[in-house]
Image (spheres, helix red, strand yellow):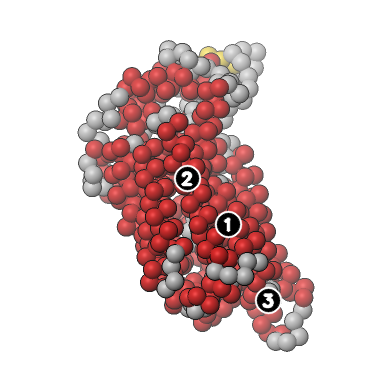
Amino acid sequence: MGDKDISHSGIEVAQISPVTVDKGSGATVALSGAKAKEVRNAELYAAIHETKINPWSKESWHLYFSIFTAFCCACANGYDTSLLTGVIAMDHFQDTFHSGKTGKIVAVMFSLYTVGSMVGSPFAAILSDRYGRRIAMFCGGVTIIVGMIITATAMAIPQFVVGRFVLGVGISIMTVAAPAYAVEIAPPHWRGRATGFYNCGWFGGSIPAAAVVFGCNQIDNNYSWRIPIILQAFACVVVMGSVWFIPESPRYLMANGREEEAIQFLAKYHGNGDRKSRLVVLEIDEMRENIHQNGIDKRAWDYKPFILTHNGRWRMAQVLMISIFGQFSGNGLGYFNTTIFENIGVSTVSQQLAYNLLNSVLSAVGALTAVSLTDRMPRRKVLVIGTFACALLLALNSGLSAALYAQGDNVQGSYAKGALAAYFLFNIVFSFTYTPLQGVIPTEALETTQRAKGLAASGIIVSAVGFINQFAGPIALENIGYKYIYVFVGWDMVETIAVS
């Protein structure tokens, strides 16, 4: 994007003053009474220190609320992970649908969600580019509620899977608009944390879902599974009510000829009310340089720049890798936690659901720890070390599972506990490594006019890999059990080499 690109969040910022910029090199910041410091973008570094944003001001709190609204979109997505893995283990659900816990029927019930997401993603990009990020989030919420109603009132598998498809379409609309919105409204030096926090909304949904399913398992009728499905709409209601009280993305405004509104936003939220502040001027210049009134965001189905230009291919390669690796590193096993727990000797449904809840909480701890470090962590190093650690922990889990099966009835309790601990540790490490970066890397890599379409393409890729996980997973677990985990051990080693 050139020297003036400030969309990246990986900027080292220290609380020191005052600063002057060596504009000859554009890379050295001379500090009064201190040694010169090497930074990625000296002009931006100086602007950030000159325009100090008060994190406790009314405007900052409004910005936090706006990012929280985007976070709720990710909650709606994350809710589904813990929802279905728990619901299919319930007796009343099985009495109604007779689906079993693994096999082809379960594969269809899970995977139609990702099919809907793939179908909806290109339309989500058009909606987000044409009508704005807020309207897209609202429309996604409406669609999810429609899908929830279809699913919650189902008494037969065909209606249930249609509802799952509609849910997937709604999620795709939300998850194209929301991360773009989070990164576009945040000041440059907050963007890593803002986008990482957005992606942690996955756990903001999965933990409540696991808790609700665990609690509702005590209900002795069909509401044991209907209530958790109905509550899938809760985050959507929050989003639909909130979007009317948050500002539109300044980059969307600038890209659609509403420059004065964009400047007013930047002055209010990034410049302490001063439209001539150094940071505001720098951001406006960068937007003008990179936003074109005839960009691909104005051409509904134009994805050619991602293929025909070197710049586009390089950016899309980053999106492609994080989208695939972030879904196919073994984390897809989370859709079948109750089955995995059963395979290592956790026999009762209530205990399986309790472990499912614990797993979500532990994973969230790993993710939130990473979020606090997102603006400082080296992306590639974290991916290399974290992915390799994921491979080792899955290998340990599958090795101990093999020992359990080899023992037959003479099961060593320590083996089962070891396999369970390795699985929990895998999810913590994966969440630390991938959860923030899944949101950060695509939004950082894509230019403004490419962002909605690039995120839509990422959504299609994520959904395609998710389809493989959700369709193949139940069948593989039925046929080969714990040996399915070996696939991810090998693939994680491939990923480690690829990102090195």
In the image: residue 418, left or right of residue 211: right
Label 2: state its secondary structure.
Answer: helix
Label 1: state its secondary structure.
Answer: helix
- The residue that label 1 is drawn on is 209
Which residue does the image show at 42% across and 29% down from the upper left? 247
Amino acid under disc 2: Val
Which residue does the image show at 73% across and 87% down from the upper left? 409
Amino acid under disc 3: Ser
Which residue does the image show at 56% across and 73% down from the upper left? 92
Q: In the image, residue 163 lies at what x, y percent?
A: 40, 62
Which residue does the image show at 53% across and 54% down from the upper left? 231
Amino acid under disc 1: Ala
- Asked whether 427 or 263 is in front, the reply is 263
In the rendered image, the vertical position of residue 244 relative to residue 155, given as above or below: above
Q: Mark 2 or 3, which is nearer the eye?
A: 2
Q: In the image, residue 382 lies at what x, y percent?
A: 58, 48
Label 3: state its secondary structure.
Answer: loop
Question: Alpha-carbon distance for marks 3 and 1?
Answer: 21 Å
In the image: residue 434, left or right of residue 414: left
- The residue that label 2 is drawn on is 237
In the image: residue 61, left or right of residue 306: right
Q: Earlier in the sequence, mark 2 or mark 1?
A: 1
Q: Mark 3 or 1, which is nearer the eye?
A: 1
Q: Quadrant of the N terminus?
A: top left
